[in-house]
Amino acid sequence: MTPVQPTARQGAAWRTTARAAVYAVALLATASVPALAQEVAASGVVAGADAAASGATAPNAGAGNDFAARQKVLDRRTAENNYQYAVAQHNCYDTFFVNHCLGKARDAMRVVQADIRHQQLALDEEQRADNARRRDEQTALQRAKDEADAPQRAANEAQSAQAYEDKQRQHALDQAQRQAEAPQRAANAQAYEDKQRQHALQQAQREGEQAQSQRAANQAAYDKKQSDYQKQLDEARREGQQKAQERAQKAERFQQKQEEAAKHKADVEARQKQAAEKAQQQQQQQKPQGQ
C-alpha cells in the first residue's frame, strides 16, 4: 500500500508536533537509562560484596540477588529499547518516507521487545522453580525440626496429660468433700435462716412496741391539747361573762347618774322658780298703798 504523503506545509507542522512529543519521550528515556545502569552496577557491587562476605552459607540469598540483577538488566534493556525507538522516530521525521521509516523503527523495536519478553518469561519460570525449591527446602527443614522436637513435644504432652489427670483427681476429691460437708452446710444454712427469721420477728416486735408507744404519746399529746383548748375556751367564756356583767353594771351606773342629774336639775329649777316667785311677792308687798 502506497503511503499518502502530506503537503509541504502540513508535513512541516506535523513533523514539528511529532518532534516535540518524541523529544519528551527521548528525554525521559535518556534520564531513566543512566539511572538504571547505575542502579544495576551498584546492585552488582553490593551483591558481590554480600556473596564474598557470606561465602557458601547463603546460596539462596545469592540466587535471589542474581534474579534481581537479571531483572534490572531486562528493565534496562526495555528502557534502552524504548529510548532507541524514540530516537529512531525522531530521526524518521527528517526523511522523505516518514511512514516507511517509522515502520522499520517499530519492527526493530518489536524484535528487541520479543527477545526481552522471551528472557522475561524464562526468568519468571526460573524464579517460580526457585520459589518452589525454597518451599520444599523449608518444608523439609520444618519436617526435620518437627521430628527432632517430637520427643520433647511428647514429653510436654505427657506432662500436660498428667497435670490434667491430677487436676481431675483433685476436682473429684473436692467434689466428694463438698458432698460430705453438704449436711453440715444445710444445717448451717437452716440455722442461719432461723436466726434471720428470729431477728426479723424481734425487729417487728420492737417496731410494734415503738409504734404503740408513739401512738400512746400522740394520744396523750392530743388529749392534753384538747384539755388545754377546753380550758382556754372556758376561760374565754368566763372572761366574756365577766366583761358582759361589767358592761351591764357600767350601763346601770350611767343610767343612775343620768337620773340623778335629771333630778338635780329639776330640783334646781324648782328652787329657782320658788325663789323667783318669792322675790316677786316681796316686791309686790313693798309697793306703797294706793299705787
Image (spheres, rainbow, N blue to C red):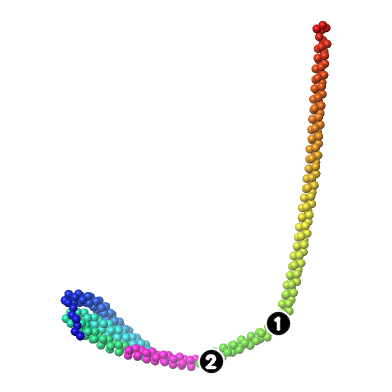
Residue 126's image quarter? Answer: bottom left
For mark 2, does the 10 Å Cα neighbourhood hold few (<14), some (14 to 19), or many (20 or more) residues?
A: few
Q: Secondary structure at mark 2?
A: helix
Farthest residue in the front direction? 290
In front here: 253 or 192? Answer: 253
Q: Residue at x 63, y 88 (%)?
A: 169
Q: Is residue 246 above or below residue 155?
A: above
Quarter of the picture containing the C terminus is top right
Q: Position of residue 288 (x, y in %)?
A: 82, 7
Q: Position of residue 157 (x, y in %)?
A: 55, 90
Find disc 1 in the rendering and name its residue.
182
Q: Is residue 153 visible?
A: yes
Q: Residue at x 49, y 91 (%)?
A: 149
In front here: 12 or 166? Answer: 12
Disc with the residue nearer the chain's start (1 vs 2):
2
Give the residues drawn in magenta, as a range. Answer: 121-149
Image label count? 2
Q: Marks 1 and 2, how far apart in space?
A: 41 Å
Q: Residue at x 64, y 85 (%)?
A: 171
Which of the labelled discs sits on residue 154, or is there none? Answer: 2
Residue 108's image quarter? Answer: bottom left
Classified by dominant secondary structure, the portion drawn in magenta counts as helix
Q: Is residue 10 magenta?
A: no
Q: Is residue 117 above or below residue 200?
A: below
Give, as a three-letter code, the residue at label 2.
Ala
